[in-house]
Image (cartoon, rainbow, N blue to C red):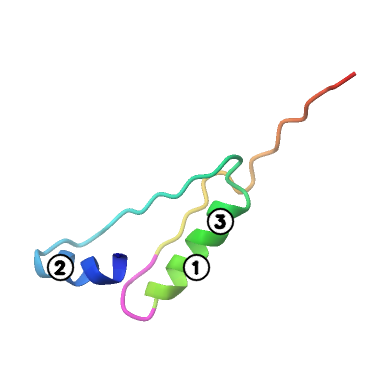
Amino acid sequence: MLKTIMPAYQKEGKTSVTIAIGCTGGQHRSVAFAERIGKAFADDYAVDITHRDVNKRKATVNRS
């Protein structure tokens, strides 16, 4: 879908597109997916990937 619409965004004069991906925790699935999308577009567009929660500490559950 993104590969189809990106040329239309450029044609309209858009200079940036923000794509947000989330998952519980933000340290595994969303990181991997963002990296994959970034690599897919890096040859044709300027790509900036920011992982907001990748270094966030996971909460621990005390089940005593």
Left or right, 46 with reference to 22: left
Q: Cα distance, mark 1 to mark 3?
A: 9 Å
Secondary structure type for disc 2? helix
- Residue 34: image location, x then y, percent: 48, 60
- Residue 35: image location, x then y, percent: 51, 65
Name the residue located 85 percent from the left edge and 21 percent from the top edge. Answer: 63
The amino acid on which the numbered mark 1 sits, given as a three-letter code, is Arg
The amino acid on which the numbered mark 3 sits, given as a three-letter code, is Val
The amino acid on which the numbered mark 2 sits, given as a three-letter code, is Ala
Name the residue located 56 percent from the left edge and 56 percent from the top edge. Answer: 31
Question: Which residue occupies the extreme right position in the image?
Answer: 64
Secondary structure type for disc 3? helix
Residue 36 got which mark? 1
Residue 31 got which mark? 3
Q: Is residue 16 magenta?
A: no
Extent of the magenta region: 43-47
Mark 1 or mark 3: whose residue is earlier in sequence: 3
Question: Which residue occupies the extreme top position in the image?
Answer: 64
Mark 2 or mark 3: whose residue is earlier in sequence: 2
61, above or below 38, in the image: above
Q: Is residue 45 magenta?
A: yes
- Residue 32: image location, x then y, percent: 57, 61
Q: Cα distance, mark 2 to mark 3?
A: 27 Å
Question: Which residue occupies the extreme front position in the image?
Answer: 1
Left or right, 15 with reference to 34: left
The answer to whether marks 1 and 3 mark residues whose Cβ atoms lie closer than 8 Å is no
Q: Cα distance, mark 2 to mark 1?
A: 22 Å
Instruction: Tell me which secondary structure the magenta stretch mostly adopts.
Output: loop
- Residue that label 2 marks: 8
Please identify the quarter of the rendering in which residue 2 is found: bottom left
